[in-house]
Image (tube, grey):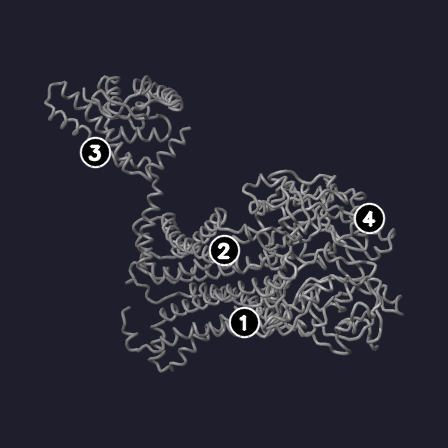
Amino acid sequence: MHWVTRLRNRFRAFTNIQAVDRDLDDEFNAHLAAAAAEYEATGLTREAALISARRDFGALTQVMEDCREVQRMPWLANIGRDGAFAWRLLRRSPGFAVTAIVTLALGLGANTAIYSVIRGVLLRPAPLPALNRLVMIWETDRTSGTSHEPASVPDYLDYRTRAKTIDGLAALMATEVNFTQTTADPERLLTLRVSNDMLAMLGVTSVAGRGFVEAEDRPGGASVVLISQSFARRLFQRVEEAPGQTIVLDERPQTIVGVVPDTTDFGVLQILSTAAYSRSFVDRGQAARVDVWMPLQPNPATLPRETHPIFMVGRLAPDTTRAAASAEISSIAADLEREFPVNRGRGANVELLSDVIFGPVRPTLYLLGAAVFVVLLIACVNVANLQLARGATRTQEVAVRAALGAGKRRLLGQFLTESMVLTYIAAGAGVALAYAGMKGLLALAPADVPRVSLVSLDGGVFGAALVMASVVALTFGVIPAWQARRVDLVTTLKDDGAGKGTAGPHRTRVRGALVVAELAAAVMLLSGAGLLIRSFYNLQHVAPGFESQGVLKAEFQLPASRYPVDRRVWPNAPRLHAFVRDLIDRTAALPGVTNVAVAANHPLDPGFTNSFRVIGREAEGANWPEISVRSVSPGYFETVRLPVLRGRPLSDADTPELPPVALINQAAADRFFPGRDPIGAQIRFWGIVRTIVGIVGNEKIQGLSAPAPIATYISIFQAPGAGVLLVRTAGDPTTLSTPIRNVFRQQDPLLAVFGLESLDAAIARSISQRRFAMLLVTAFAGVALLLAGIGVYGVFNYDVTVRRRELGIRLALGAARSSIVGLVVNHALVLISIAAAVGLSAAFGFTRLLSSLLYGVGAGDPVTLVGVVALLALIAIVASALPAWRASRLDPSRTLRAVD
Amino acid sequence: MKPVDLVQGTLDLLILKSLGAEALHGWAIARRIRQLSRDVLQVQQGSLYPALHRLEDQGLVKASWGVSEQNRRAKFYSLTKTGQKRLDKEAASWHRLASAITMVVST
């Protein structure tokens, strides 16, 4: 392995020069001693022998240097020399150095940060080994036009037995459980019920204990759970102790049979947020980690074909494509539709699991990636411009070097080293910047971005930053070398130097083109940012139909064991209704509370929908979409300020004993009762007929960017379900958090309270992904604007400096100062016009990337685009007028006499 | 007889040849060459040491530290396998060259 020795020697020669020199000393001294010994043997004195030995040896230091040279690489020495030279040059022109380094650091830093996010979220291998073979099977509903619905248990069992293109079909159901402990308040834990083959299919193995077995996955099976590693660590000293222990969930003891890794819930959050009608865990405003896993125990008796609570995840059979599976599953769905009347209108939709998980974030991340890349390009153009300007003043130096025998390659090497020194300093600063910015970036990132916790500045990111910097450095090294190619030795050396005044038409054109390029890039970014800002503004000013300000929500779930719903007295549920009444009374008594309501769902929770019929128009209703059913206490309308447009609101008089009533929203009235009066009409769902007594406004329960769906409001006292307490106060609603927790504690100490936050906070979170994209693109556009401004200033400043004489002659011949400024600004305006044309056409491509993030504004919105161009024109005019104005103040008699 | 200068490019061959039998330090190599050539060939230290370091760098000889006859820390060089092969090749081509030159010169 001689190359190992060789490498070691080289490395040693590079790092430990003293040791190398010591070895050479020893080696030569041994030689001298031997030679002297020989002389001594011929009869010379010791002294004389040594002198003779030395004389024979020759120039000791020269030999030493020659030996050292063997292990050193000449190009390495050149790099060292060039590096030192570059460093001196940079220190001599700090203005150039600082501008270039800051510019590049901004560009490289932003790219490093965004790349680390993209890498963490999208590029890293998923924790599921077979992710690209896994598919989601959604049910679809032609009557309501939804394509991402959960499935029913009987459908799932049928798909499992019939499908041949799927060689494993698992199912999961998202729920939450109350975890009661002796020492602290009850807690709400995110829970998944999964079929026993789910974990094996995902490729997950337990870190302690075992997974579920088939016998546990049957209706009435054992009460067993798996828990997450983090949860196990919290409960027990060692994770291995967990299996065999018992914990109390939903007031029932459950035996822990195993512990699974925290990453086991990979993708679940995205599945839930993709599904229609389903609440994502993220909406709860709490840590989104699944801590408890239970067997699905699918029971068609309790979960019949008309309820759709479960999600199906399948693995494609070998040599099968998604398309083939989709075709087969669709035909099975058609069979089921023929066999079962309740499946009317139902189809199926097969989607790759990876698309479900990454699909929603891809556009945002690619958009950000494109945006930072444009920032880097602008930074590069700026530095290229600086280099060009500097190159013009360095022709003398280059000519001298060339005259002294520096070849083209040697000059290129020197320029490359210079740009590397510059770029690597900038890259270092950029990485530091990225590191500092990372925290802020991740704090801004919406919670439903998958794997955001994996984002970090690791070796891979540093590697990418290094590669990026190297590419940039190479480009910049080549520019001055390319310029030097045109240096004419004789004329340059005869010239008295100091870059006297002729920029030359060629160079001016190149610099003009660069200015156009960076202005165009800035137009593109600013257009994107402008559209996102307008969308965000529109969203924030969208009327949600209710008033969130001043309202606090607190969610809970009543266990069926203690708050039973008896189907014989349906829809009465005495204990549940008593709980609701007490909760309202106790909360209303708190100081500062102006309104209280209890509802099944808060206004940002889409809740569930049901099919319904209008009495007397049954045939018509067969193709009507499902309607959102909202169970609310009578105080709801006052509490969230949802206006009752006609008729009467619900009242305390609407008791379970009296005929049930309902309100419908304006959307439903418009859709189903055009030209008729809905009040007095009767609608039926859940087998109960209700009389419509009023019409209320539309609430945007599916999110601010989605239109308000059709909805009906029924009294919570004429329906079986409660899930959220809503409280309005005149002051800051969050101050009520503790008193409200106490109310729950008094009323039912075993109940877990969750999602305790203001409605404003819930709204803010619902648009957090747009906010993320908007803030970042705006920040990048701001940087782009700044850089473009600096770039334009730099170019015109240089231009004016070079043209001092010409401008002086014009002034001396009687040109007005204003016409001098006009001359320069005119030139700038020409460049801006070209840039605007180029930039706007590029912007159409760029803004297409963000169409999914726009709201209430088109991708080609003229107001935004005109505004952007106007803003940029303003910046460019100021940046060019400033140096022009300075030039016009010059005294022509001085400029003309100056010998530079 | 006065020592003659080395023919260009033959120093490496001489060094490799002198290392054929055992590991030697720099001075001993110079002495061996002098002895083998019966004092005709005199190697200058100025060329010997850079040549040794270059051969080491190329992997033709390897070095280890030992103690010289004068009880000093000295660097001993020995032939590697690659060095041995190179020596055989160089020696063969030298013989061809030398006999060719002899033929030309003696006619």
Q: Is residue A748 visible?
A: yes
Q: Chain of mark 2?
A: A
Residue denoted by label 4? A332
Mark 3 crowdedness (10 Å alpha carbons): few <14, some 14-19, many ≥20: some
Residue at screen point 33% across, 39% down: A14
Quadrant of the image for the C terminus of chain A? Answer: bottom left
Residue denoted by label 1? A868
Asked if marks 3 and 4 fall on the same chain, the answer is yes
Asked if marks 4 and 2 fall on the same chain, the answer is yes
Q: Nearer the viewer, mark 1 or mark 3?
A: 1
Residue type marked 1: Val
Q: Earlier in the sequence, mark 3 or mark 4?
A: 3
Between A166 and A517, the one nearer to me in the picture = A166
Badges 1 and 2: C-beta atoms under 8 Å apart? no
Residue denoted by label 2? A113
Looking at the rendered structure, the secondary structure element under dot 3 is helix
Q: Earlier in the sequence, mark 1 or mark 3?
A: 3
Residue A73 x %, y %: 35, 39
Q: Nearer the viewer, mark 3 or mark 4?
A: 4
**C-alpha gap between disc 3 and disc 4:** 92 Å
Residue A554 x %, y %: 63, 63
Residue type marked 2: Ala
